[in-house]
Image: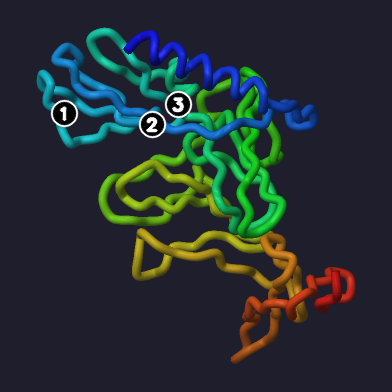
Amino acid sequence: MQWYLALTFIAIALLCEDTLSQLDSFNSTALSTRAFVKKDCDGVKTYICDSCTSRRPCFGTQEIETTFSCGTGFYCIEGTTADRCGPTPSEACVISTESTSFTCSATGIFPDPNNCNYYHVCLAISESSTVYRCAPGYVFDIVTSSCIRQVSVSNCVTVTCPVGAPRYVLYGTSRVYYAVCNGVSLPTQVLRCPNGALFMYFSSSTLFGECVYTCSGQGNYANSNNPSSYFQCYISNGRLVYNELDCPSGTVFNQTLRYCTRQ
């Protein structure tokens, strides 16, 4: 078994070495995909890693169905008698938690929900994102949309999904980025509100909400998430309100002309 695992990790390392490329402007590297592999209670450990950011207790070889999150900026680290939480992920966890690309719901740059060392670039809606890794000692920052040097634990932001009912969870303190949590597994994607919009929970729910756009005046305004749509702002019943409209097929919204034109 050990020789088989060794060959597997060597193959993964060779594959990653062959596919990595440098992105100097972001101090980052393009990555291949990953998948977390959870181990079983072995009769020795009192805790095992349930994911790279959470763990579960063990009673002998019996796994207890209760997950304890390590908290923002901390990772589950494998140990001899118990897996514990710490600020630096173990080598095995780094290998198993390389970010998997997702289907883009908008264009632009997105943080990874599970590991602050990674981020995603979406060039077109409905296409797969390209995954990048920041340089060692750097984390992705949503304010600058680039990798910055990590000087404190608070620089590393991830999403912790509560076990139970599906819900939307904010990315840190941001009201622009949020994640979809299914109540079972780790989040796979972070979504972003367009420029001029903030995520708001519904008044009747603490689990779900939507991006609410704020009109700066009357007229048509670009949707930064989708070049083929726009916001139509107008006054209704004495209030400034909006509709989100799609451009005709084969056209995109022209921010200068304020209407849709051919590409």
Alpha carbon separation for disc pair 1 and 2: 21 Å
Q: How far across and how far down the image is residue 11, in percent?
A: 53, 19
Q: Is residue 111 positioned above or below 96 on the image? A: below
From the viewer's perspective, is 114 left or right of 205?
A: right
* Residue drawn at x 49%, y 32% as measured from the top left: 34
Residue at which label 3 appears: 96
80 or 171, which is in the foreground?
A: 80
Mark closer to the chain start, 1 or 2: 1
Q: Upstream in the sequence, badge 3 or badge 1? A: 1
Q: Residue at x 67, y 41 (%)?
A: 143
Any mark on residue 110, and which? none
Residue 149, x across and y down, in percent = 66, 23
Helix, strand or loop at label 1? It is strand
Residue 238 seen in this snapshot: yes
Q: For the residue marked with disc 2, what is the amino acid?
A: Gly
Residue type at tag 3: Ser
